[in-house]
């Protein structure tokens, strides 16, 4: 059992028909999103409880909730095959691989950006990676409920599976890499984003078809990982459009 905090995340979870067990709203809360949540919950026979501010603080663990949270089953991860089967429908599918992203806020921001960019699925590692929890759900603004996310033990094996399925693998890496805009993304693509501090691991980089970097003009030579992911994903969209 986990909690989804915030108006937008709860609304998106309802739209995605996630397994919500109950919704708690702080007494006296109003607004268009709250009205939408109540209507969708009623349609799905989900209990909505209004509680006093003091009780609500206790129930919500005193977190920033915007006066609402939902109790749900643990996040339902997808299988790689689920992502590949859905991606087959498109001429140029796009998959995002995350190599040991550890900060839940970064993971949530990446998921939000990936969903906006039309990514067909996200594959992350089980070890040394953040799981999809209530912080990730809130940071993703509900996007985690609208995109397939799979977890794997071995990212290199997954890369080889994707290659056999016709994907070209592009790893984001500083140094000994080509400009990210010089790569042709009008083909099935899987982009690999690495750990916040160390980047993608050497063995993972070795199995990529291309290594791409974003040129830096300032004194700081690295971007936040979620920002870098956004730049790469929207370059893919720019070329394909």
Image (tube, rainbow, N blue to C red):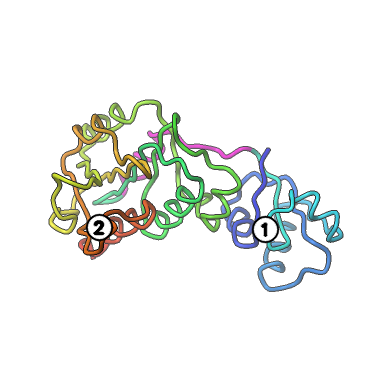
Residue 231 sits in which quadrant? bottom left
The residue located at (24%, 32%) in the rendering is: 202
Residues packed near mark 2 inside 10 Å, few (<14), some (14 to 19) or many (20 plus): many
Q: Residue furthest bottom?
A: 31
Number of numbered discs present?
2
Residue 64 marker: 1
What is the secondary structure assignment of the residue under circle 1? loop
What is the secondary structure assignment of the residue under circle 2? helix
Does the stretch in magenta take in 77?
Answer: yes
- Which percent across, then down, holds residue 116? 41, 60
On the rendered structure, is 216 left or right of 23?
left
- Which percent across, then down, holds residue 130? 49, 39
The residue located at (19%, 53%) in the rendering is: 185
The vertical placement of 111 against 123, above or below, is: below
The residue located at (85%, 57%) in the rendering is: 54
Residue denoted by label 2:
236
On the rendered structure, is 212 left or right of 96?
left
Residue 12 sits in which quadrant? bottom right
Residue 234 marker: none
Does the stretch in magenta take in 164?
Answer: no
- Name the quadrant of the C terminus: bottom left
118 and 130: which is toward the camera: 130
- Which percent across, then down, holds residue 177? 15, 47
237 and 19: which is toward the camera: 237
Q: Which residues are magenta?
A: 74-89
């Amino acid at each position: 059992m986990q909690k989804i905090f915030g108006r937008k995340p709860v609304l998106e979870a309802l739209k995605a028909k996630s397994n919500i067990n109950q919704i708690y709203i702080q007494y006296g809360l109003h607004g268009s999103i709250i009205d939408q949540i109540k209507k969708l919950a009623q349609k799905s026979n989900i209990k909505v409880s209004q509680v006093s501010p003091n009780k609500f603080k206790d129930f919500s663990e005193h977190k920033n909730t915007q006066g609402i949270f939902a109790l749900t089953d643990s996040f339902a991860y997808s299988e790689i095959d689920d992502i590949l089967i859905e991606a087959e429908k498109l001429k140029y599918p796009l998959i995002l691989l995350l190599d040991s992203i550890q900060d839940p806020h970064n993971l949530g921001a990446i998921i939000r950006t990936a969903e906006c960019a039309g990514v067909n699925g996200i594959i992350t590692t089980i070890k040394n990676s953040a799981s999809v929890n209530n912080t990730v759900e809130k940071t993703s603004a509900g996007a985690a409920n609208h995109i397939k996310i799979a977890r794997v033990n071995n990212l290199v094996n997954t890369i080889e599976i994707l290659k056999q399925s016709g994907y070209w693998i592009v790893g984001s890496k500083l140094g000994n890499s080509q400009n990210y805009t010089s790569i042709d993304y009008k083909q099935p693509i899987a982009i690999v984003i690495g750990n916040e501090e160390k980047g993608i691991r050497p063995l993972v980089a070795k199995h990529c078809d291309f290594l791409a970097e974003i040129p830096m003009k300032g004194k700081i030579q690295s971007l936040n990982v979620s920002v870098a992911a956004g730049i790469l994903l929207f370059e893919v969209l720019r070329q394909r459009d």
